[in-house]
Amino acid sequence: MFVLQVAIVVLLAAGALLALVLQSRHDIDREARNRSVSVAETFAHSIGLPATLKTSDPSAILQPVTEETRKAAGVDFIVVMDTNGIRYTHPQPDRIGKRFVGTIEPSLAGQVHTESVQGPLGKEIQAVVPVTDSAGRVIGLVSAGLTVKNVTGVVDRQLPVILLAIATGLALATGGTALISRRLRRQTHGLGTQEMTRMYEHHDAVLHAVREGVLITDGDGRLLLANDEAKRLLGLPEDAEGRYIGNVPGLDRRMADLLLSGRVATDEVLETGDRLLVVNQRLTHPRGRPEGTAVTIRDSTEMQVLTSRAETARKRLKLLYDAGGDIGTSLDVVRTAEELAAVAVPRFADFVTVDLADQVLDGDEPAPGADMRRTAVSGIRDDHPLYPRGRLIDFLPSTPQARGFGTGQAELVPYLVDAPGWQAQDPPRARAIVDYGIHSLIAAPLTARGVVLGVVNFWRSEKPEPFDEDELSLAEELVARAAISMDNARRYTREHALAETLQRSLLPRALPEQSAVDVAHFYLPAQSGVGGDWFDVIPLAGSRVALVVGDVVGHGLHAAATMGRLRTAVHNFASLDLPPDEILARLDDLVQRIDHDGDGDDTGGGVLGATCLYAVYDPVSQRCTMARAGHLPPLVVAPDGTAAIVDLPAGPPLGLGGMPFETAELYLAEGSQLVLYTDGLVEERTRDIGEGLELLRTALSHPERDPQESCRAVLEILLPERPSDDVALLIARTRTLGPDRVAQWDVPFEPSAVGATRNAAAKKLDEWGLTELAFATELILSELVTNALRHGRAPVRVRLLHDRGLTCEVWDGSSTAPHLRYAATTDEGGRGLFLVAQLSEHWGTRYTPEGKVIWAEQALPGSPGSPGAAGPALAAFLDVDPI
């Protein structure tokens, strides 16, 4: 064996020597060609060569240069010639002027040409390169090369080195073979053939006893070995060994393809018959050409079944877990339905539709047999033939949706094509659904707190297997979890609708008629819940008007109800004609009492916080008096478009108590705009309140707009898309009551002045065309002036205002409040104010820093509410027949 190995090594060394010599010759020849081309191209592209070729004697210049270059470059010759092949240079000067030996036509065409020729120096390897001028024309040629004898000499000089290397390799290989043989004898411990045979038998016994299949194949695709377990798992015959794998009977085609592929496989699962086999395959010679494979096979059928069930359970638990976090993120019924549909596609169903009873969308509980509206649709594609979103559906009693809605039990329809009750709802659409590929359905009712809100439909199309009972249970669990969120959203929708209805009912539906200001208003409840913002316009005596805006902290029914209580209180306090600071003080006391009443109430009946701004504008004096309790200050837009925030003392929010409220008074030119608003307009998460106020000023700086246009401009710039707080806006443009509509007299503090005052008033009424009201007005003035002279103090002043009604005002310096009395039949006095009340529509008293004002207002003739004449009322009072 050792001699055979040495002989093989010698043969391999001889072959290697021959290959090295041939390869060396080839490499040196290629190197000679490359060097010739490089030298010729370098010289051909040298600077000045084209100019030298155009001289009268190029040889005289080029011959010494080429010789010097040839010696430096290590080539045997460099020849420069013209386009006819006549040499200008040559190592042998006698060859100059003679024709070049070689092929020049390719180079004349601009190409580099290499060849082997018999030249003046012998067998030569040469390259011919064109020389071009600046226009790209070939004006000459350069050839460089080596003789073959020089090339062969290089190889001959390398041969001793090659032989020495081969001899060294032969010695090393022989010594290595000897060492390996010695090592093998030592590793086998000197075992002979019998011992080796016995060892093989033991190995074979173990191979066939293990409970894992083992296969060994050769590089030609033949089965060399298959143990008993492999034959059992693969159903192989006894004579399978030695056969071509593709021809082994009973072998599964996928297993045969894997064995023949020879690729590496790691724990690859193959289904063969009713078994799931885990296959590992490795090459027997991974560092050389594959000569076969070793394959192990184990049966994992039972483990795969358990793993599959565990994976299915894991996916279902993950679906339910995700549903808990993804469904019910908002208290919106439609949004919750959309989240339910989205979470189940495509992990559980290919299409999901949610049908809710129509009343649920309004926050109410559904009635039995109610029609359902398709609220959400989600699917893997958009071209499905299912009912679209928004469709109102009256399901027939035979449909699974109607049965589920009526009984509260989920319905499983494994095969829609065989479900006549479902198809009866809409036969054309049912055929379109089946033709589309949807073949199975689960209809699960949304049941929360014993009330069925709607039905969720799970449709399957991609997976060929129908829904089964396990999936029905999963659908019920998924819908049950979503139903709680759906019912919470429904209850919130109902409360939100009730709160919004309550708040809108408490807000003014239409602003009262008055002449002091032109008003535009806007109110929008918050998306997250109705709050407590409100505004109001309250006509006051003397053609004045009160403008109010307020904000109750919080949302919901409680905030809306509190807002209604405060608004009613403001109306009541305004009827007393109190100044703004006193009205806010009384509101502050009221809020404190409300909070005190709610201290022992767990329902939160107290007021968490409230702000208010109260302003009174007098169109006669054009003065506006205002005060605020923790509210944002108003803006005033002058007639020239200048918008400024009123410097108004803030005052504490309502309910804190212990701190006074301050008033501010300013003059408003006719056409000025007074802007009242709540913080929901100017304050938002994306901007601070300073930026919002600046935007508000910018939107209002257009004096040519009327209040409605200004309101639209403000909302266009500042109104959030989904406001998180209520938004209230009130814009009032001021008017004036001109001197031609006002009459005023100072009354001397003596009884004789009453008649003169009556005469002056009657004359003024004639000028205004109100002669019909002269008699009643004279009676009213007589009583009021007499009371002022008898019970009041100087100074006394009378003012008549001709506006939407006729107002008589009597001013005096006393703060004593008049009281209406009902005199007995025998009483001689006490009927004055009663007479005033009977002759006027409204009357009252307001207090000023100098005293008080008693006023009485009459309707103009022909206006709504006008009594027509004072005669009937006066006659009834005097108990005489009317004239």
Image: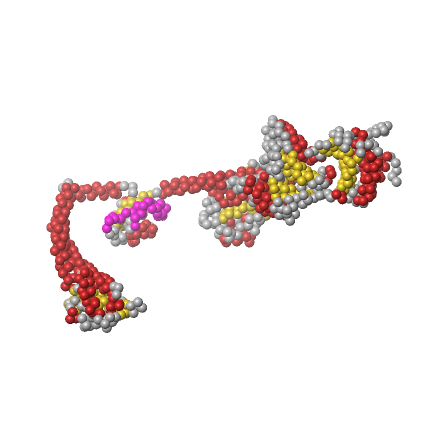
Q: Is residue 283 magenta-colored?
A: yes
Instruction: Give left or right: position of 77 versus 472.
Output: left
As displayed, is residue 872 above or below residue 16? above
Q: Could you say where residue 687 lies in the image, as x and y percent from the top left?
A: 53, 41
Q: Residue furthest left?
A: 3
Instruction: Give left or right: position of 266 versus 807.
Output: left
> Is residue 218 among what the camera can see?
no
As displayed, is residue 256 above or below residue 572? below
Q: Could you say where residue 638 lies in the image, as x and y percent from the top left?
A: 64, 44
* Magenta-tinted stretch: 263-288
Total label count? 0
Which is the main secondary structure of the residues drawn in magenta? Answer: strand
Q: Determine the image quadrant of residue 92.
A: bottom left
Q: Determine the image quadrant of residue 600.
A: top right
Between 126 and 173, the residue placed more toward the observer is 126
Task: Please report the residue visible at 62 percent of the width from the left and 39 percent of the height from the top.
Answer: 646
As displayed, is residue 312 above or below residue 382? above
Between 316 and 225, the residue placed more toward the observer is 316
Q: Could you say where residue 592 lies in the image, as x and y percent from the top left?
A: 63, 29
Q: Is residue 410 magenta-colored?
A: no
Between 68 and 634, the residue placed more toward the observer is 68
Q: Could you say where residue 107 lies in the image, as x and y percent from the top left?
A: 26, 68
Task: Please report the residue visible at 61 percent of the width from the left and 34 percent of the height from the top.
Answer: 649
